[in-house]
Image (tube, grey):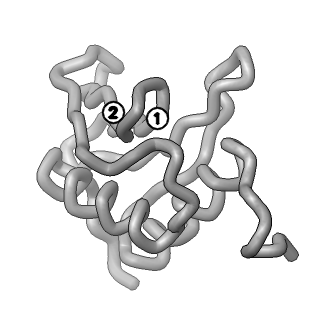
Amino acid sequence: MIDETSELNEEKMAEKVAEALTARGLSAFAQDTGGGIVCIIVERKDGGEIAWGTADVTWGAAVTDEDGEQISSVETKWPSDSQDIAATANALFEASLGNGALLTET
């Protein structure tokens, strides 16, 4: 069990946020994309995915179609260094839905 009072590393934070998104009905998981970069992948209802990351001071994502081609990007105002799992998941949930995320039955 992770001590919630200690700071989470990027990988653990991504895993926890992905779990929170899944609990809210999205198909989401954390993925190491190489070079130590961990993204949160959210499936889109018409194929493709939304790949969330923290490369900037806020959370952002690349949106791809079913062929893996990037069709747009998403910027949020949510700080990428936040350790608030619920608030981070909320910010990504709303932005994911707005970009075609697959909402599953919970």
Q: Nearer the viewer, residue 59 or 67?
A: 59
Q: Residue at x 72, y 55 (%)?
A: 8
Q: Earlier in the sequence, mark 1 or mark 2?
A: 1
Where residue 91 appears, x then y in whole percent?
A: 30, 60
Residue 26 in the image, given as x and y percentages of width and height: 37, 65
Give the residue at x 40% y 69%. Answer: 87
Residue bearing mark 1: 53
Please state the total of marks drawn on the protein image. 2
In the displayed structure, 62 sits above or below 89; it is: above
What secondary structure is found at the residue carrying circle 2? strand
Q: Position of residue 103 (x, y in %)?
A: 27, 67
Task: Tell me the quarter of the picture where residue 68 sits.
Answer: top left
- Quadrant of the image containing the N terminus: bottom right
The quarter of the picture where the C terminus appears is: bottom left
Q: Decide: few, some or many residues near mark 2? Use Cα within 10 Å; few <14, some 14-19, many ≥20.
A: many
Q: Quadrant of residue 65?
A: top left
For the residues bearing labels 1 and 2, Cβ distance under 8 angstroms? yes
> Which amino acid, mark 2?
Ala
The 10 Å Cα crowd at callout 1, few under 14, some 14 to 19, many 20 or more, is some
Against 99, residue 12 (above or below) is: below
Question: Which residue is depicted at the point 24% across and 46% down?
Answer: 77
Image side of residue 5 versus residue 84, left or right: right
Q: Amino acid at mark 1?
A: Gly
Helix, strand or loop under label 1: strand
| Residue for badge 2 | 61
| Residue ID at (75%, 73%) | 5
